[in-house]
């Protein structure tokens, strides 16, 4: 495609638009946008379009439309940065741009949410249309379903630019109650995702809000979840058949949780730490995901108990006492899964077996000095130099799953222990 910015007629058009913007300079992020100012600005830009008809003739409609798209993107970025924009339209603006904006009406709450969290910096998150995401997932086909999140199904998708993404679609239904539940979980997760940034947390790419549809778009995690590798469709994979790799995955996830507890402002309790919420990217870096149940500091009291059976903190489900140590308990279960290869709750014994939780299976053996007996046979017993590292992980795990939160370590202590275990593994492999 030719570079239309070098076309003199288009330069003339750009100048006219520039003059329109200058003449309406009162439109700034600091002053906000009133309907009158937006209408005035839109009229001036419209006039610029009309006075520059030769730009379309000489440069081709597609090039000018490309410029319109840029104006549209700029307006959306401005809109997200201004609290009093709301869901108002831009009257008098080019019809194509106006239609695009109408088809992507974002709730005022979401715009305020993003504005409060990021100020003017919204460029990192894209507002997708439902049509784009339908095309990316073959209309949300069953074949593209890769999992379920806190408020809906997750689909694998491929954007127009070739990027692979994971798209979480809120549960849809005719009942308003279902929509309200979806909307609440969606708003909760979006509120956290726009303000947390860490290499061990799943990154959001963008979102979509149209009518009753609520969708979040994430980077695609090529290697699935930790649960998949331990218990599910990828359990035949040999990648996790080393204690060093298992400890590395645990360390990655613990650092993500540490960020939530100690570096996010305000601090965040995840409330649903489990192996299926620990995802692994193409380079085998683990990332904590799914913030639909998360709570920020100050919101811990008087909340409905939520989470996953097998990972729930006893203090939480018996006394409704939610603290950061509740996440530590869930992570302790994950550590026991990594050590034993067992699910949080599994069938044990002959004749179909009876249900047993991994705490009752593993903790007595570890305390009794029989660690090797309960280790995952897929990895096998650690060698002499790895044994110290695996023992350190096992003792960290049993402290994490103490019945009372006051007896559990902080996530900082857990990270330090796993870093030490990783160093021991590194040293043993250098010998």
Image (cartoon, rainbow, N blue to C red):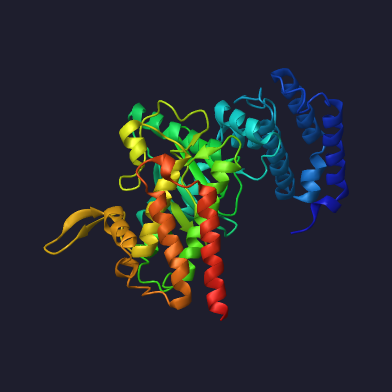
What residue appears at the point 36 percent right and 59 percent down from the top-left corner?
A: 337
Q: Measured from the top left, where is residue 397 in percent x and y? A: 41, 55
Q: Measured from the top left, where is residue 3 in percent x and y? A: 80, 56
Rendered view: 1 above or below 45: below
What residue appears at the point 50 percent right and 48 percent down from the top-left corner?
A: 133
Q: Can the viewer see residue 237 in this picture?
A: yes
Which residue is situated farthest in the front direction here?
A: 368
Residue 78 horizontal side relative to residue 55, left or right: left
Q: Measured from the top left, where is residue 47 in percent x and y? A: 79, 30
Residue 52 horizontal side relative to residue 301, left or right: right
Q: Can the viewer see residue 222 in this picture?
A: no
Residue 220 horizontal side relative to residue 231, left or right: right
Q: Foreground: 426 or 72?
A: 426
Image quarter hosting the N terminus: bottom right
Q: Foreground: 9 or 169?
A: 169
Quadrant hosting residue 88: top right
Residue 303 horizontal side relative to residue 34, left or right: left
Rendered view: 61 above or below 302: below
Which residue is situated farthest in the left direction here?
A: 351
What residue appears at the point 79 percent right and 39 percent down from the top-left corner?
A: 53
Q: Foreground: 254 or 215?
A: 254
Quadrant hosting residue 427: bottom right
Rendered view: 317 above or below 203: above
Report the label total.
0
Image quarter hosting the C terminus: bottom right
Quadrant hosting residue 195: top right
């Amino acid at each position: 495609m030719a570079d239309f910015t070098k076309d003199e007629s288009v330069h003339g058009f750009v100048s006219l638009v520039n003059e329109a913007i200058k003449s309406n300079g009162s439109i700034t992020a600091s002053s906000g946008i009133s309907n009158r100012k937006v209408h005035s600005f839109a009229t001036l830009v419209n006039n610029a379009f009309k006075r520059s008809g030769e730009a379309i003739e000489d440069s081709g409609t597609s090039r000018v439309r490309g410029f319109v798209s840029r104006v549209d993107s700029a307006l959306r970025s401005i809109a997200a940065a201004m609290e009093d924009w709301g869901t108002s339209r831009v009257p008098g603006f080019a019809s194509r741009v106006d239609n695009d904006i109408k088809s992507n009406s974002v709730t005022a709450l979401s715009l305020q949410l993003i504005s409060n969290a990021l100020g003017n910096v919204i460029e990192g998150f894209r507002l997708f249309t439902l049509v784009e995401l339908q095309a990316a997932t073959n209309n949300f086909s069953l074949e593209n379903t890769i999992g379920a999140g806190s408020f809906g199904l997750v689909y694998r998708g491929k954007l127009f630019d070739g990027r692979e993404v994971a798209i979480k679609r809120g549960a849809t239904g005719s009942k308003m109650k279902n929509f309200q539940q979806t909307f609440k979980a969606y708003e909760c997760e979006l509120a956290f995702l726009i303000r947390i940034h860490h290499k061990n947390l799943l990154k959001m790419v963008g979102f979509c809000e149209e009518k009753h549809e609520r969708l979040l778009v994430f980077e695609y995690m090529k290697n699935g979840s930790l649960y998949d590798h331990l218990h599910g469709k990828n359990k035949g994979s040999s990648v996790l058949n080393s204690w060093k790799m298992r400890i590395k995955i645990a360390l990655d996830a613990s650092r993500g949780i540490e960020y939530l507890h100690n570096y996010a402002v305000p601090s965040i309790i995840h409330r649903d730490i489990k192996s299926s919420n620990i995802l692994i990217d193409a380079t085998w870096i683990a990332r904590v995901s799914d913030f639909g149940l998360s709570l920020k500091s100050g919101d811990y009291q008087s909340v409905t108990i939520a989470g996953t059976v097998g990972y729930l903190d006893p203090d939480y489900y018996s006394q409704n006492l939610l603290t950061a140590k509740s996440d530590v308990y869930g992570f302790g279960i994950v550590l026991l899964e990594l050590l034993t290869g067992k699910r949080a709750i599994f069938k044990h014994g002959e004749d179909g077996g009876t249900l047993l939780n991994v705490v009752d299976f593993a903790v007595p053996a570890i305390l009794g000095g029989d660690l090797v007996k309960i280790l995952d046979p897929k990895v096998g017993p650690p060698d002499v130099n790895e044994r110290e590292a695996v023992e350190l992980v096992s003792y960290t795990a049993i402290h994490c799953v103490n019945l009372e939160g006051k007896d559990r370590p902080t996530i900082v202590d857990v990270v330090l222990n796993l870093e030490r275990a990783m160093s021991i593994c590194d040293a043993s492999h250098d010998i």
